[in-house]
Amino acid sequence: MTLDVHIRAKTYPSRTPGKDHTAIAGIDFSVPEGQFTCIVGPSGCGKTTLLNIVSGLEQEVDGTVSLSGRPTDEAHLGYMFQTPRLMPWLSVLENVRLVMDGGENGEKGDEDLARRLLEEMDLGDVMDAFPSRLSGGMMRRVALARAFVVKPRLLLMDEPFISLDEPVAKRLRKLLLAIWNERPTTVLFITHDLNEALFLADRILFMSPSPGRIVHDYTVPLARPRAKLASDDIRNLRQNLLKEHPDLLTGLIGVEEEERRESDRRHLASGKETG
Amino acid sequence: MFDLKVLSGSPSGFWLRFFSLCLLLLVWGVVAAIADSSLLPGPWAVAVNMVAHLREGDIVYHTGITLARVAVAFVVSMIIGTVIGICMGHSKTMDTFFDGWLVLGLNIPALVIIILCYIWFGLTEVAVIVAVAINKIPLVVVMVREGARAVDRELLQVAQVYRLSRTKTLFKTYLPQLYPYLMAAARSGLSLIWKIVLVVELLGRSNGVGFQLHSFFQFFDIASILAYTLAFVGVILFFEMAVLRPLEVRLTRWRL
């Protein structure tokens, strides 16, 4: 289930012709099966666009995305959005069941799995409640159960714990890791919080500001299970990382290198011409 | 607290409604007694008249005919209006294209449509249904279009990402967003349709409540006119209370 992403460019047409907005400028990476990869970048750098392309929500793109050589729009995906996006007219259990055997493959959904997942999420008592009755953290847990109930081969998460207060977010991160541990799958997790990424991920891809590109590929040298978000390990890692690449979070290093190489090449070319 | 109770139809609300209706009957009775004219029969006279019509069976027959016409016209206009409304809500081109037609449809007097339908289609049931539907469809379109414009695309993306089938997407993620608008269209539609159906019947049918009212009018039989009217209003109210209201509660119970 290797995920291969090769995007040459993603542009949005703008009102003034000829000045199309470039959201993503060249992204190439592969995620091996079962790896938890975080994508970190400043807001507006095209992270969500990237995820929409990977999920198949965004079809018009110059590039290809494949999961073990097949397009992702045939695959079982789990997707957690920035907001829970539950159907308000369906109960908690119905919301989770909604996405089961939804695929064209005709696979019969496991009726019990929805209940079991909800119970693991501590939502056993509210299965028949409507989402409007739940707190923000509970709604996220339902969305998490919904993402895992399809037995996803690829799990996409778009800053799912944003706008939660820290204790709730902390609990959800632990829950995510626990459930991912039991049901391993390839994860692509977007965040702009470096600590969160260091806590969760096996590997972190850093994106530059818009138009987005990958500027650094970092493997997290921490064993699992990891203690907690505010541990010394993570603080040290963060400091080292920022010391080595001080511009990382503004995403400038890669671009500068790229530009230097570009201008070198131009110098060489012009040198040849004149010489 | 008290206001909420009254509105939610709790016992105190029920008695308030009951009392208000009794008062209306009383006023009617007193005015009829003072006028003492065959042109304004009192509630009792109307009730006696209604029982007589029920014994003869004519009120049941004609009310049934009218109800059947209302039902067919209602279903036809809801389906066509919903489809057009959804299309116009989602496509800017369609919206611009049909907007002129819509304004025209909303503003042609019902009477003109009825006369033209009778002339073009003859004095037939088809003419009845077409005339009523043309009157009603624009109103459904306007409401459903509003709903379609307000559809939450983020929820549709969920359906897309989880590869839900078309039927599931339609019935579990799309239509529920339109239910409040469809319910509003249905309720306002019902009251409009049955009023128009009576006019249509009066102008060109030989049965139905409208036809009967026409006959009673020629004989100045006011008691029968009131008896038929009250009977029919009763049926519609019953449908509203027994079907539409519970349906609405069911479809929108998730809104707390």
Image (cartoon, grey):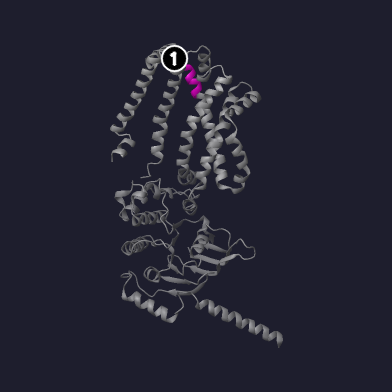
| Amino acid type indicated by mark 1 | Ala
- Check the image and report above or below for A174 versus B38: below
Q: Main secondary structure of the magenta part?
A: helix
| Count of numbered tags | 1
Residue stretch in magenta: B59-67
Determine if residue B119 is in view.
yes
Q: Chain of mark 1?
A: B
Q: Quadrant of the N terminus of chain B?
A: top left
Q: Quadrant of the C terminus of chain B?
A: top left
| The one of A81 and B245 positioned closer to us in this rendering | B245
10 Å crowding of disc 1: few (<14), some (14-19), many (20+) = many
SS type, badge 1: helix
| The one of A99 and B237 positioned closer to us in this rendering | B237
Q: Position of residue A246 (x, y in %)?
A: 44, 79
- Check the image and report above or below for A30 versus B193: below
Q: What's the residue at 46%, 15% (across, down)?
A: B222
Q: Position of residue A219 (x, y in %)?
A: 42, 74
- Check the image and report above or below for A233 versus A105: below
Q: Quadrant of residue B27?
A: top left
Q: Position of residue B17 (x, y in %)?
A: 33, 29
Q: Which residue is mark 1?
A: B223
- Taking the magenta stretch, the answer to whether it contains residue B66 is yes
| The one of A152 and B235 positioned closer to us in this rendering | B235
Determine if residue A112 is in view.
no
Specify whether A23 is left or right of A137. Answer: right
Q: Position of residue A240 (x, y in %)?
A: 39, 80
- Check the image and report above or below for A97 versus A206: above
- Taking the magenta stretch, the answer to whether it contains residue A268 is no
Q: Quadrant of residue B255?
A: top left
Q: What's the residue at 62%, 26% (across, down)?
A: B117
| The one of B190 and A132 positioned closer to us in this rendering | B190
Q: Residue furthest front?
A: B34
